[in-house]
Amino acid sequence: MTKFNPLLFALLFITVPAIAAPNAINEVLERQRQHGFISPSLAVEALTAVRGDLAGAPVELRMRYHNQLALLYIGAENAALVKVELDELERMATDEKCVPCGQYKTVRQAQQAIRGQDTAASQALVGKLEAIASADANLMQAVHYVRAGHYDTVGLHARAIEEALVASQLAMSTANPAEQVRTLNVLMLANIGRRDLVRAESLSKEAFALAERIGYVYMMAYIRANGAWIHSLKGEHAKQLQALNDVLKITREHPGLGDSELVALVNLAEYHYEQKSYKQAVQLATQAIALADQQGKPVAKGVVMISLGQSQIELGESDKGVQSLQTALVLLNKAGAKSYVMDATRGLADGYERAGRHKDALATLHAYVKLKDEATLREREKAIAEAQEKFSGERKDNEILRLSLESRGRQAEVDARVWQQRLWATAALALALGGALLMLMIKRSRARNRVLEDSNAVLSDQSVHDPLTGAFNRRHCVTLMSQHEALLASKSRDRNYSAGVGLMLLDVDHFKHINDTFGHAAGDAVLVEIAQRLLGLVRQHDVVVRWGGEEFVLVLPGTSAEGMAVLAERVLQVIGSAPVVAEGKSIPVTVSAGGVSYPLLPGQPWQDALKVADVAMYMAKESGRNLAICLITIASDTAMTTLVDDLAGAVAAGKVLAKVIAGPVAQVDHGMQVSI
């Protein structure tokens, strides 16, 4: 539903508390701090109107003035004026030795990178922010706030919440209600990313109430827009519509909120198209197009013309719809808005077909396939980059976990220090008794420290790995999939984003028989060997998890449903083609597997997708074992309960297309797509 990243707007308007200074600049900054503003443009006007008071003002006041203007110009997407303000902060840092001036410049540069969705740049700048340690609570509030925004955009929502909570506490400690509103908004977004929609809705209500109380009109509109997103994810369409209409009402009652009004109209047009209210969608899209022309926003115009064209086609006006989609395609291509070009191309192909222009439809469909292939390649490269960034973040998280695991070791370290003090206290006596006794005491102390270090390393490793097989453990899988779920949720606002996560659940066939016949030691050897074969098969960024007992899970980022079927065949081959040798005995081993590409349905929790994979795996068991069943396509109107309770029936009814893959022993044509 939402086409513009809400976090990018929310990060644009951080202010810092005013110091006591009897002038107009201080009064304007303090007013924005206590009450926010109606719109960014009006906030800029208020500041530029008192610019003459800068002459002779203290360096702190000038710093806050240029810092605030830089933020507002970022919101206005005026890169030239942003540079002017940042250059002035840099000059003050250099010429006037104003250390916080340079630090605020870094904060704003990071916000500008987040606004431009330049993840690599924001990552580098956030790294610099992590080095800032200041007694200035206002500066640290801004630092933690921006870090929260960055972590949310890259899908590390738990870290985003940690940073936002610190920022919130600092906002309250400095009596900054406007900043508290913005921080609540970021907390809400991070919880949406985690799919904790109950908490997100509670934060939305709290943030809106505070914004309304202090008169922060801009954030009132923005928070309601995010509330519409929450209702959309919860399937509460009536509440979603009400929230979007509230946004429209707010923006039309106050000046300077044209950008927010345009976003509301674009989303309302799409909402009515999705609800099959095509006449209403056309009416709203027409209003949005006029406003986009007025504001000079070609991308917004191109996006809403997709909804317009698709609605016109549904109303039987195929020629008009085709023309609208052609215009959308021209606008979006010219603007380089690749994330929307695919939607326009796909819609145009459909429009040509319904207009009877089959040759044009075929040519456009070929163009769409080419664009999709290119997008898949870009997403694959992007996924690798994001995985590297996540790894960097996760290393920090793991360091925190490691420190937590060392809690038992800390007491040992205290004991070691006490031991060292005793050692020095008795050094004279030891020397009197002889050097041998002293060396023995030192040797024991060093040995104790080595044991402590080794124990800490083992504890850290065991926190994420299964001790028997060396595969990742269930806890790590839960953490990883929660991050993937949050990333997919944040990307869902990008209509072109379609990359998912493959999930394959494997269960060793007749494992109880293996244990009963060959012994539990042999059973353990089988599990270890299966884990090693899987680790040797998957890609570097794939994850092998021992889910429990004889069950394994493969987490396969960027793997499509068709790709799952290809991998399933390789899995069955690599495990079933050679027996496991344990204690001199040759043990034939096969597995049964179920594979899905998450998400199966919009807004679906990852646990539900794994549950469906589990059902598919048991179907493979019931069909003779040494099989994999991968779900290829699922009808959009299929309920989750149907997939779990009667997957076989859904396949038989044509609601689900499944592919059955046989292992190397079974005589089944594993290349056929069959109904079960």
Image: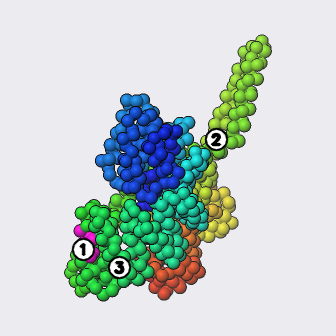
Residue 225 located left or right of residue 366: right
**Residue lying at 42% horizontally and 38% vertically, measured from the top left:** 62
Nearest the viewer among 341 and 671 is: 341
Reading the image, the residue beneath label 3 is 283
User: On screen, 648 above or below 564?
Assistant: below
Nearest the viewer among 295 and 253 is: 253
Alpha carbon of mark 1 to alpha carbon of mark 3: how far? Answer: 19 Å
Residue span colored magenta: 324-330
Q: Earlier in the sequence, mark 2 or mark 1?
A: 1
Nearest the viewer among 73 and 670 is: 73
**Residue lying at 24% horizontally and 77% vertically, measured from the top left:** 323
Instruction: Tell me the element at label 2.
Output: helix
Alpha carbon of mark 2 to alpha carbon of mark 3: how far? Answer: 65 Å
Instruction: Tell me the element at label 1.
Output: helix
Alpha carbon of mark 2 to alpha carbon of mark 1: how far? Answer: 62 Å
- Where the N terminus falls, by quadrant? bottom left
Residue 309 in sight here? yes
Q: Please, what is the three-letter code of the amino acid marked with disc 3?
A: Gln
Q: Coloring scheme of the render?
A: rainbow
What numbered label is drawn on residue 326?
1
Reading the image, the residue beneath label 2 is 456
What numbered label is drawn on residue 114?
none
User: On screen, 299 above or below 72?
Assistant: below
State the predominant SS element of the stretch in magenta. Answer: helix
Nearest the viewer among 315 and 18 is: 18
Q: Are marks 2 and 3 in contact (CB under 8 Å)?
A: no
